[in-house]
Image (tube, helix red, strand yellow):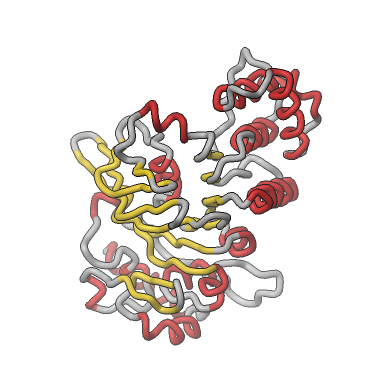
Amino acid sequence: MSLLEVRDLCVDFTIGDRSVKALDSVSFTVDEGEIVGLVGESGCGKSTIGRALLRLLPNNGSLSSGSVVFRGEELTTMGNKAFRKIRWKHLAAIFQDTMNVLDPVYKVGDAMSEAIRTHDSKISRSDAWKRSRELLTMVGIDQDRVRSYPHELSGGMKQRICTAMAMSLEPDLIIADEPTTALDVIVQDGILRQILAKQRERGRSMVLISHDVGIIGEMCDRVIVMYAGRIVELGPVRSIFHEAAHPYTLGLKAAIPHLLSEGELVSIPGSPPALTKRTEGCDFALRCPFAQEICATKPPWVEVGPGHFELCHFPEKAREFREEILSPDIWRSVRHRLEETRT
């Protein structure tokens, strides 16, 4: 049995008098000790998945259907009191917008030790403070900062403290949503490696949410590629990066700049469709260089390799697509098509 099993998860947002589907029939699993990467453009639904799993959707958001099973228990129908015993102790999160999470009247050590003792009543106050100091060291902050107030810290330090707090209870699964956004590039790499090393050392799992394809490729065991609220490709990291099948995934890979790249950089023209204008067909069709008439119909979910699936009408053409995707001419044709739709 998987640690986490998500099936046909749908999330709707109410905007004015309209309801839009931000997540459409999302299904995936996370196994014990597995690091799963969630990648895609901004607005594709990555963060919404994280907040839905933790039942932290905004007031205008609702989980309209689907199932979330964690350690054999259904979370979507669980009462609030029971869920609070799971959240943070067994299922924790590191969000990208954590700058103002810390209480301004609490010292860092008080905030961290309170979080630890709230979920572990057996630990003493002194031991909780000791644990807080160790966690600060882990994320590269001087232990003396336990006596600092939030206003005395930089944005990057606050981000790292929130990361330490999420890991303080050694949860079974961490949802890490762009956990190093506010940090310098070199610090980002070090903190991410520490988080992942700790999770692997303890045999714990993580869902790493990022728009950085390189980070996902280097640090994850399995990859989920999202587009416009749907999963378009899913599989082992090696399979996704060496034998990607979906045109969107291929476009993301082709857009990664390299130091030795020559000529025109590749980019995916256009923008994802508005959620209010979705159709039954492929959401990527208008931006896809290989789109055909059949793409106006619902694409099938097809296995293209061991544990490797894609949402596309042309799984048999994946190899052909991989050979053609790097050509700037392919993407120029998409730009022309998009320009024609605007006129």
| x and y, in percent, of residue 312 in the image | 33, 73
Q: Judge whether 85 appears above or below 300 on screen.
A: above
The outermost residue toward the left is 17
Camera-side residue: 4 or 150?
4
Q: Judge whether 214 appears above or below 94 on screen.
A: below
Q: Quadrant of residue 105?
A: top right
Q: Is residue 188 visible?
A: no
The outermost residue toward the front is 122
Which residue occupies 73% across, 19% down? 126
Which residue occupies 46% across, 58% down? 40
Q: Is residue 30 visible?
A: yes
Horizontal placement of 240 versus 75: left or right?
right
Horizontal placement of 248 versus 62: left or right?
right
Horizontal placement of 223 versus 126: left or right?
left
Which residue occupies 66% across, 74% down? 261
Q: Judge whether 163 appears above or below 243 on screen.
A: above
Q: Quadrant of residue 183?
A: top right
Circle count: 0
| x and y, in percent, of residue 257 in the image | 62, 67
Camera-side residue: 244 or 20?
244
| x and y, in percent, of residue 1 in the image | 43, 57
Camera-side residue: 171 or 237?
171
Q: Quadrant of the C terminus?
A: bottom left
Which residue occupies 44% across, 29% down? 84
Q: Judge whether 166 appears above or below 120 on screen.
A: below
| x and y, in percent, of residue 99 in the image | 59, 30
